[in-house]
Image: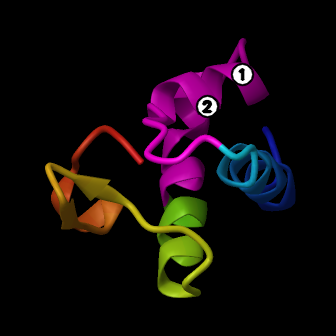
Amino acid sequence: MISAEDIREKIMEIALSGKENKAVYLSHLARELSSDNWRHSMVQVQLVVDTLIKEGKIVSTQNGEAFEVLTTGKPIL
């Protein structure tokens, strides 16, 4: 299983890549970090994303509305 720190580093790498409004599918992120067991990593990926949102490190929006991943179940970051 991948570590929360590995997930956090990858998300921040994507966020700081300079591409504004880049859609990141959490399943793609999980597959990239743990191709064999990506489904088992999804909850951990969602938790790290929500933590980063709450810390103000990233913003998650869809159609201009902010949301938290775990409470809405929306698929993108």
Q: Amino acid at mark 1?
A: Glu
Residue 71 position by quadrant: bottom left
Q: Are marks 1 and 2 in contact (CB under 8 Å)?
A: yes
Residue 4: x and y in percent read: 76, 59
Mark 2 secondary-structure assignment = helix
Marks 1 and 2 sit apart, C-alpha to C-alpha, by 5 Å
Give the side of residue 12 with respect to residue 51, left or right: right
Task: Quickly name the residue at label 1.
Answer: 32
Mark 1 secondary-structure assignment = helix
Quadrant of the image for the N terminus? top right
Task: Quickly name the residue at label 2.
Answer: 29
Give the residue at x 70% y 43%. Answer: 14
Magenta-drawn stretch contains 6: no
Give the residue at x 44% y 31%. Answer: 25
User: Which residues make up the magenta segment?
Assistant: 19-46
Question: Camera-side residue: 60 or 48?
Answer: 60
